[in-house]
Each structure stands twice: as C-alpha cells, then as structure tokens.
C-alpha cells in the first residue's frame, strides 16, 4: 500500500453524513494500481484500519479516503 495521506476533516464529515443518510451516490476513485473507477453505491461505513481511513460501498467494496476524487458531486480537492 502506498503512503496514506489523511483527508481534510470537513471532507471526512461529508462522507460520514452520506453514510448516515444511506443515500445512493456516485463515487469516482482510483485503486492502488492507478486505475480510475466510478461506482453508484451507498456508503455503509467510514472507518480506520491499518493506519488509513476507508469507506465501505454497499458493504462490499472498500476505498481508501485519499483515493477518492469525487463523491456525490463533491470533489475532495475542494477541501485542500
């Protein structure tokens, strides 16, 4: 795993709010190999594990928070 870069606390709050509301959203993210993915899903959890923060999509896919580009139309970089 590449070095984790913590995300802005306000962006983290946005993700937790979406998880609480169980709203179906579109997430654009990249994987460790650099490929870009888009998923329409529900954020079921935001959690810390192995020195990084993650979100769980539909309880199946996990995405490291620093790999997210856009979630529900909100860019992570808007919070940098």
Image (cartoon, rainbow, N blue to C red):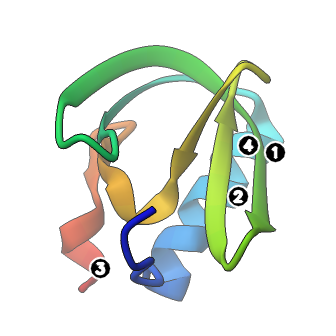
Task: Say if 22 sits above or below 20 in the image.
Answer: above
In screen coordinates, is 29 left or right of 72? left
Q: Are marks 1 and 4 in contact (CB under 8 Å)?
A: yes
Q: Are marks 4 and 3 in contact (CB under 8 Å)?
A: no
Q: Earlier in the sequence, mark 2 or mark 3?
A: 2
Q: Are marks 4 and 2 in contact (CB under 8 Å)?
A: yes
How far, Cα to Cα, is label 4 from label 2? 5 Å
Residue drawn 39% across the image and 79% down it? 3
Mark 3 residue element? helix
How far, Cα to Cα, is label 2 from label 1? 6 Å
Q: Which residue is mark 1?
A: 20
How far, Cα to Cα, is label 2 from label 3? 15 Å
Q: Residues within 10 Å of mark 3 (few under 14, many from 20)?
A: few
Dot label at residue 19: 4
Q: Earlier in the sequence, mark 4 or mark 3?
A: 4
Query: What percent of the width, then of the height, locates residue 61?
Result: 62, 25
Q: Which residue is mark 3?
A: 79
């Amino acid at each position: 795993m590449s070095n984790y870069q913590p995300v802005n606390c306000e962006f983290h709050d946005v993700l937790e709010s979406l998880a609480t509301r169980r709203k179906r959203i579109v997430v654009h993210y990249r994987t460790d190999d650099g490929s870009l993915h888009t998923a329409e899903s529900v954020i079921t959890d935001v959690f810390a594990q192995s020195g990084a923060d993650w979100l769980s999509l539909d309880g199946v896919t996990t995405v490291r928070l620093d790999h997210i580009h856009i979630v529900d139309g909100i860019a992570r970089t808007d919070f940098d």
